[in-house]
Image: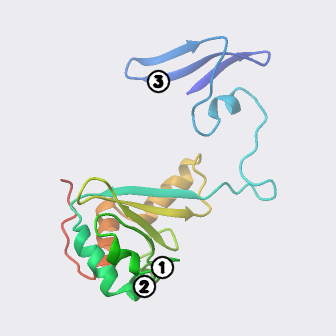
């Protein structure tokens, strides 16, 4: 993407899509890039991150896992709550809410994976919640520090440190279930 401007006035945004390179002209533009790219390319003043060190808000890594035996996982939370290092959560909630649950914790398992040599989990703890669709969970790894979401080098570094999606899922699944050799192939 690029912009065309003249004397401080934005005239067009240059985009590339399935139709090729195009100029989209207009009198008013709404920057929906997520990072203010159009405004920045147009010469508008901007800052990135905190004033004192330019560090942005921490990134969040989130993905969906399907074909999860959520009942077996819930049962493990009831039987072995200490294993999952639940953050501000009572194990009792997993006894009473059989259909859906939310977990915030697993810090001890992240620490163990790192101690075992796996550095591909870029956060201190893991959150997940069961979804409305049976057998599906949403994994949310918040607070991936010192990653600038607008910087291709930072994003590449983060991706490279995590390994392939299959490796990452295998490590998380092994940590959560205590078992290995799960089928993490694309379904």
Could you tell me which residue is drawn at 39 percent across and 80 percent down? 92
Query: In the rendered image of this protein, does residue 138 appear above or below residue 176?
Result: above
- Say which element carries label 3: strand
| Inter-mark Cα distance, 3 to 2 | 45 Å
Identify the residue position indicated by label 3 in the image. 16
Q: In which quadrant of the rendered view does residue 81 lie?
A: bottom left
Camera-side residue of 52 and 173: 173
Q: How far apart, in angstroms, are the residues tagged by discs 3 and 1? A: 43 Å
The residue tagged 2 is: 112
Real-space Cα distance between discs 2 and 1? 9 Å
Please tell me which residue is depicted at 45% across the width and 67% down the height of the picture: 127
Residue 6 placement: quadrant: top right
Q: Quadrant of residue 20?
A: top left
Q: Are marks 3 and 2 in contact (CB under 8 Å)?
A: no
Q: Are marks 3 and 1 in contact (CB under 8 Å)?
A: no
Looking at the picture, how far across and down is residue 93, in whole percent?
A: 40, 75
10 Å crowding of disc 3: few (<14), some (14-19), many (20+): few
Residue 135 lies, in percent from the top left, at 23, 60
On the image, the x and y values in percent for residue 116 come to 39, 85
Residue 34 lies left or right of residue 186; in this view the side is right
Earlier residue among tags 3 and 1: 3
**Compared with residue 134, is residue 8 higher up or lower down, i.e. above or below?**
above
Quadrant of image for the N terminus? top right
Q: How is the image coloured?
A: rainbow
Which of marks 2 and 3 precedes in the sequence?
A: 3
Q: Which residue is mark 1?
A: 107
């Amino acid at each position: 993407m690029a912009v065309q401007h003249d004397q401080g006035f934005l005239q067009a945004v240059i985009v590339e899509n399935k139709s090729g390179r195009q100029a989209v002209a207009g009198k008013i533009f709404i920057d929906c890039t997520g990072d203010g790219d159009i405004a920045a390319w147009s010469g508008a003043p901007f800052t990135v991150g905190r004033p004192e060190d330019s560090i942005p808000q921490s990134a969040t890594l989130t993905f969906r896992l399907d074909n999860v035996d959520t009942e077996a996982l819930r049962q493990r939370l009831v039987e072995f709550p200490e294993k999952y290092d639940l953050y501000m959560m009572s194990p009792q909630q997993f006894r009473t809410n059989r259909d859906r649950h939310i977990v915030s914790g697993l810090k001890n398992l992240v620490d163990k994976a790192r101690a075992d040599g796996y550095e591909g989990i870029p956060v201190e703890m893991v959150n997940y919640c069961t979804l409305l669709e049976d057998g599906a969970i949403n994994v949310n790894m918040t607070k991936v520090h010192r990653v600038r979401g607008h910087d291709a080098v930072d994003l590449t570094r983060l991706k490279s440190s995590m390994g392939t999606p299959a490796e990452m899922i295998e490590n998380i699944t092994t940590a959560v279930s205590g078992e290995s050799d799960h089928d993490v192939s694309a379904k």
